[in-house]
Amino acid sequence: MMFIHRVALHARSACRVSIRGFSSGSTSAPKVNAFAVFAQPESFDVDLDTIEASFRSLQMKYHPDQNANSTEPLEAAEIEKKSSELNEAVRILRNPVLRAEHLMALKGSSPLQDESSRVDDPQLMFQLIEMQSDYEEGNAQEKEQILAQIRGQLKDLEPSFAQKYAYGDLENATQVLTQMILLERFLQRMTGGAV
């Protein structure tokens, strides 16, 4: 009983304190619009097959090894920059959470961008604290079940974000994205970085 009380107190305080470690990354506007790189509309719902095909085609064109014989140093630097932009853009678009973060950043909104960001979802925070405890104490099968549950929750949030973003409801899209970020960060912590 004492343990449950301490966990509940921790969950309440976790919602009031800054969320260092949950930062989603960059606090500035994106340097490159990942959607524009592949001539795609700025939408959460993307055609990954089209993006992958475009990526392979552009990567062949701009890969530094394909252009190793370039005699112009400026041209070589530009090719390397373009290749780097392609890799970053495809990384963002392949990952639903990064894609959602990128969309919000393009609109000038980035949840959890700094230490002053707060999470106003005590239920989710309590659930994550409880799952982390269960994960740490569980056997391999129980751990995999917890990870599968979190992956399922993350997948279930994607249509909600897409709908809210598509209708211009950025405030609620931000709330859903915050949940997505927290769930993905939980997965990364529990799996050592792999999601």
Image (cartoon, rainbow, N blue to C red):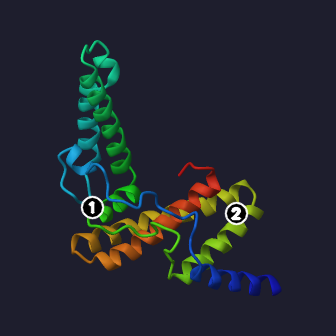
SS under mark 2: helix
Residue 124: x %, y % from top left:
55, 77
Q: Amino acid at mark 1?
A: Leu
Residue type beneath disc 2: Tyr
The answer to which quarter of the image holds residue 108 is bottom left
Which residue is under mark 2?
135
Quadrant of the image occupied by residue 125: bottom right
Label 2 crowding class (10 Å Cα cut-off): few <14, some 14-19, many 20+?
some
Residue 91 horizontal side relative to residue 41, left or right: right
Q: CA distance from mark 2 to mark 1?
A: 36 Å
Q: Residue at x 67, y 67 (%)?
A: 132
Is residue 192 found left or right of 176 in the rendered image?
A: right
Q: Residue 13 sits in which quadrant? A: bottom right
**Which residue, as the protein is rendered here, is positioned at the far right?**
2
Q: Quadrant of the image for the N terminus?
A: bottom right
Neighbour tally class for label 1: few under 14, some 14-19, many 20 plus, Cα within 10 Å: some
Residue 30, horizontal then vertical, whole percent: 32, 54
- Identify the residue shown where x is 69% and y is 61%: 142
Residue labelled with disc 1: 106
Work out whether mark 2 precedes mark 1 in sequence or the reverse, and give the earlier one. Answer: 1
Identify the residue shown where x is 24% and y is 50%: 35
Residue 74 percent across, percent down from the top left: 25, 25
Name the outermost residue toward the front.
73
Residue 91 — which label?
none
**Residue 24, above or below 62:** below
Q: Is residue 131 above or below residue 171?
A: above
